[in-house]
Image (cartoon, helix red, strand yellow):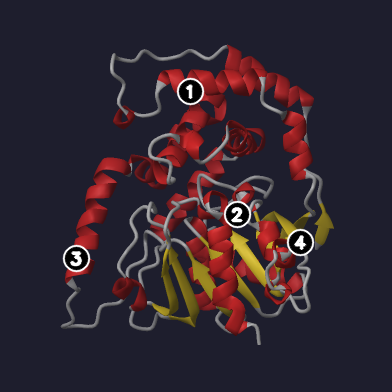
Amino acid sequence: MIEPFLPPLSQSAVDDLRLRLRQTRWPDTVAGDSPWLGVGRDFLIDLCRYWMDSFDWKLLFENLTSFHHYRYKAREGHIHFIYEKGKGPSPMPLILTHGWPGSFLEMVRILPLLTDPAAYGLDAADSFDVVIPSLPGFGYSDKPAKLGMNFFRVAEIWVELMSALGHERFAAQGGDLGAGVSTALGLRHSNRICGIHLNYIPGSYRPYLPPGESLTEAEELFLANSTSWFDENGAYAHIQGTRPYTTAYALNDSPAGLAAWIIEKFREWSDCEGDVYRTFTRDELLANVTLYWMTQSISSSFRMYYEGRKAPLRFTADDFVPVPCGITHFPKEILFPPKRWVERGYNVQRWTEMPKGGHFAASEQPDLLAGEIRTFFKPLRQ
């Protein structure tokens, strides 16, 4: 049911990627490029040349193989995951779930801060046994052959995986799509969950509003801002949620196109003031894009958006996340609702406003996020 796994590295696939990059047909642009027109041509040409000529494949492979990788056999196929045991007296089991356009690579910087806090001068009693799975259809996890792989089914698989690892009760954390999966865990599997920690509120989440009760002014403003944000920035989500195949044909065939589609989000959603290299190195950005390229998973990753539209987190009168919830808001996060909006559907026990950071908190500000995770779960360890 669980087997060791070694991330593959194919020289022929590397050679094919370099050839495709060399043969890229670059589109025309106009003078005075604006970021609102998309990723700049000069920026992308420079990045792709680096990818083709200087990207450190050996370092990427060494970084991947420095962790313990496994695969779990679910009924829909194999789920890839990293599993690192905590170094402490009684580590708490914790499952970290990534989002889109990220991957399990988002979590590698925060991993040692959670498994071995004593190495950083912190309390060893706050350690975790950390499980970092790749969502179905992402990275080295198998691609679902049928529709229906939504937040709720992924949550079921995570429960099955943690049981197979011997963890009957565990904690969950996530942002982006990972926040949706963690919410589903707390909503549908509260008997197995110690608590959930989120650094994002799922975009499809709508709390139940009792008859006759009105939204607060802050909630009304949030909904208006959300509508405006999606009008200006939400084209990617709309096409991925309604016509996921159409764009995927091009992105699965063009590494330059794939890089533009993914890295645009890292530039716009991180706390980088428009300069993505302030927050991420070229190698960090390209490692993630390379994972999507080598596994040909852009199409299957899009389907999570389609599934989310079919099974959104629209709470009814009977829906409430009863387990303790910790919420951490990073200032450059996209579309973060007011506290009251979240409290309508979650048992919020801790809410923290952070001084810096954006959407990719685990890789942007691993120290800050790890500190919040340790603090929130500390009283829940018994």
Q: CA distance from mark 3 to mark 1?
A: 39 Å
Q: Residues within 10 Å of mark 2 (few under 14, many from 20)?
A: many
Q: CA distance from mark 4 to mark 2?
A: 18 Å
Residue drawn at the location 77% of the way across and 31% of the way down: 58
Residue 135 — which label?
2
Which is closer to the viewer, label 4 or label 2?
4
Q: CA distance from mark 1 to mark 4?
A: 36 Å
Q: CA distance from mark 3 to mark 2?
A: 33 Å
Q: Amino acid at mark 4?
A: Glu
Residue 159 locus on image (x, y percent): 65, 71
Q: Amino acid at mark 1?
A: Leu
Quarter of the image where one finds residue 347: bottom left
Q: CA distance from mark 2 to mark 1?
A: 28 Å
Residue 206 — which label?
none
Residue 258 locus on image (x, y percent): 52, 30
> Is residue 35 rendered to the left or right of residue 247?
left
Residue 220 — which label?
3
State the residue position of label 1: 44
Q: Amino acid at mark 3?
A: Glu
Q: Tell me if residue 250 comes above or below residue 101 in the rendering.
A: above
Q: Residues within 10 Å of mark 1 (few under 14, many from 20)?
A: some
